[in-house]
Image (cartoon, rainbow, N blue to C red):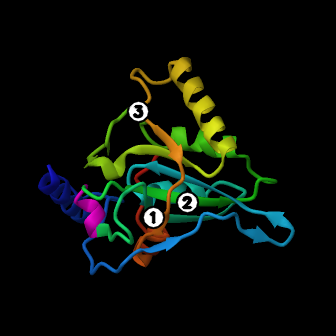
């Protein structure tokens, strides 16, 4: 299964838009999840995994009130993982996007709405052609309030019957975030390729 996930990762890098690249891999860097400040406004952070992080980053960057969105890895056991290691699927990390936002301009609930729109939360350990636990649907909450809001949002989506299968999204407290290699950041802007997420 590990070999299959890596093969999918590498083949996708060559042929599928927004699903990985073959490069020399630099070590990712761990960063804290403390809110950032901008002037007198306290910025907040939210972390989401919804498949290939390139499209997720692009989707959140388009939301008014989002100050920054960074591709990275979270939820695994290996410190400072590389993209290649995460692609093997045995580090436990998910490809995630950490969103820094201005709560005076966009609510966390609005970010949750975007999250549900840009992927299929009923798929387990995959999104479309991307297969492996690194592509799982996950919400990492940065506070008890975010965890509560995420659980309420998930329950509402499940009850509404919007999807014909149960929601598979995991919800957990935000672990250490490891920023992905620089070539992953702003990938679609750099490459001029269209996003693989519908939004």
Q: Quickly name the residue at label 2.
A: 98
Q: Nearer the viewer, residue 21 or 108?
A: 108
Point 50% across, 56% down: residue: 175
Q: Quickly name the residue at label 3.
A: 168
Residue 124: image location, x then y, percent: 33, 37
Q: Is residue 86 magenta?
A: yes
Residue 97: image location, x then y, percent: 50, 58
From this viewpoint, is residue 199 visible? no
Q: Quickly name the residue at label 1.
A: 72
Q: Do the residues labelled 2 and 1 touch (CB within 8 Å)?
A: yes
Q: What element carries label 2?
A: strand
The residues tagged by marks 2 and 1 sit, at their Cα atoms, a distance apart of: 7 Å
Point 41% across, 74% down: residue: 28
Q: Neighbour class for label 2 at 10 Å: few (<14), some, many (≥20)?
A: many
Residue 31: image location, x then y, percent: 54, 71
Q: Which of 112 and 29 is in front in this view?
A: 29
Quadrant of res 75: bottom left
Q: What stretch is highlighted in magenta?
A: 84-89
Q: Neighbour class for label 1 at 10 Å: few (<14), some, many (≥20)?
A: many
Q: Is residue 51 above or below residue 162?
A: below
From this viewpoint, is residue 122 visible? yes
| Mark earlier in primary sequence (1, 3) | 1
Q: In this view, does 13 lie to the left or right of 65?
A: left
Q: Is mark 1 on a helix, strand or loop?
A: strand
Instruction: Specify the principal SS of the magenta part.
Output: helix
Residue 1: image location, x then y, percent: 14, 49
Q: Which of 119 and 139 is in front in this view?
A: 139
Q: Is residue 88 above or below residue 140?
A: below
| Mark earlier in primary sequence (2, 3) | 2
């Amino acid at each position: 299964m590990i070999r299959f996930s890596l093969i999918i990762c590498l083949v996708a890098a060559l042929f599928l838009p927004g699903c990985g690249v073959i490069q020399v891999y630099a070590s990712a860097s761990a960063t804290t999840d403390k809110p950032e400040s901008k002037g007198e406004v306290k910025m907040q952070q939210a972390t989401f995994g919804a498949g290939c992080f390139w499209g997720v980053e692009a989707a959140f960057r388009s939301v008014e009130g989002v100050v920054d969105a960074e591709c990275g890895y979270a939820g695994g056991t290996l410190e400072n993982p590389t993209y290649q290691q995460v692609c093997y699927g045995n580090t436990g990390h998910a490809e995630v996007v950490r969103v820094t936002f201005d709560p005076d301009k966009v609510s966390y609930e609005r970010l949750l709405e975007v999250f549900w729109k840009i992927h299929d939360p009923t798929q387990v350990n995959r999104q479309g052609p991307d297969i492996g636990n690194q592509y799982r649907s996950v919400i990492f909450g940065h506070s008890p309030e975010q965890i509560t809001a995420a659980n309420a949002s998930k329950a509402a989506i499940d009850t509404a019957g919007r999807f014909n299968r149960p929601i598979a999204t995991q919800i957990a407290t935000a672990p250490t975030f490891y920023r992905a290699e620089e070539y992953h950041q702003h990938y679609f802007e750099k490459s001029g390729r269209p996003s693989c997420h519908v939004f």
